[in-house]
Image: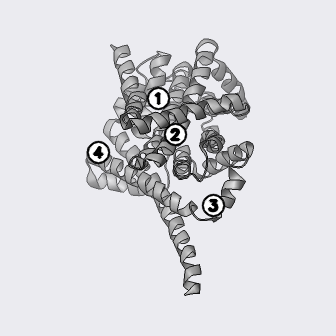
Amino acid sequence: MELYDQEQPVKNKTKSYILMLLAIILFIFSIDLLTVAMGQLNNTVANDILMATKNPFVSLFIGLLMTALIQSSSTVTSSIVAIVAAGNMSMEQAVPMVMGANIGTTLTSTLVSFSYIMKKKQFKRAISAGIIHDFFNIITVFILFPLEYYFQFLSKIAHKLASFFLTSENYSGTFNYNNKVFTRPLTEWISETIQIPFLTLVLAIFLVFGAIKLLSSSVYKAFVLDSFQEINNFVFKKTNLAFIYGIFFTAAVQSSTVTTSLVVPLVANKKVSLKKSFPFIIGANIGTTITAAIAAFYKTEAAIALAIVHFLINFFGALIILPFPGIRNIPVRMATYMGAKSVQTRFIGFAYILLTFFIIPFLLIYFSNN
């Protein structure tokens, strides 16, 4: 009996880790299926939208809206890089769009928090953890957008850095971007079998939300045991350490969406405080831009420069906010306030998502084009 009692927690923990791994794989698969479905459904429309306007403000919200719909900033930014490399879009148009994509990708972690909507205290902490990623990117854009608009601050730095990657003459051949992940053969087979892009899209959306729910519950079960206390003390104890772990962990899984979604249940269940999790989230923002190194294979200065811009946006955001406790606490306080308000009136949380990620961007794009 005693041996059984000792083995049971180990088995439960192993089961939770397996479920978490399966949830991450399902999450990546569902996002990839969504990407394939969106590409087949309106690839031409997406390219037309990307190249439709020269207004930097509209460009910003196009990036935000497209990423919120597709839920993959890497898909949106890689499409933008491809168009810039082909010479069909200027850096001035592209940089605000990448900023918008940075904001749009934070929607997932906010959605994860709604899995706790029936639990008042947990929901308050969860939505604060989800929204804090939004606020960090929004504040970063508020600071950097005017600098880019008036002085081409990011573009000029990126072009200078890009020149170091070019060891020979600029490559002017056909631009090809391969953004396939390991699930792509299966997602393409499913899409071809169904042969109706809209049905594939609906299936992908259901799988995304199912994966999010499974990911939230499995992460909590995996880390709720006593052993997490040691990890908590080690990873989240110091600001700089949490920041570094955020970078490396996200670089490993190649998705800030996955990383920040993992943090939400930890904060919701009081395993990590919101204040201590914030540096980790900032690090995750930088970690996801490691894919900028792939741009070196493009061999075009424009493509490399835009990939570097993606890194610089998050790097300067971290440089401005992370070192100064007073500034670093601003997003924390804003997120805590929104969490408290969302618990008082659940509609506020839904209204925030709809307004920030869909209604405002759509209306601004629609009226600007008219």
Whether residue 82 is visible to the viewer of this picture, yes or no, is no
Q: Which residue is mark 2?
A: 128
Q: Secondary structure at mark 4?
A: helix
Q: Are marks 2 and 3 in contact (CB under 8 Å)?
A: no
Q: Is residue 199 above or below residue 102?
A: below
To which quarter of the image does residue 290 belong? top right
Q: Position of residue 45 (x, y in %)?
A: 34, 30
Q: Amino acid at mark 4?
A: Pro
Whether residue 259 is visible to the viewer of this picture, yes or no, is yes
Q: Which mark is residue 197?
A: 4
First in sequence: mark 2 or mark 1?
Answer: 1
Q: Position of residue 33 (x, y in %)?
A: 39, 50
First in sequence: mark 3 or mark 1?
Answer: 1
Disc number lying in front (3 or 4): 3
Q: Secondary structure at mark 2?
A: helix
Give 71 or 86, whichever is nearer the viewer.
71
Q: Which residue is mark 1?
A: 63
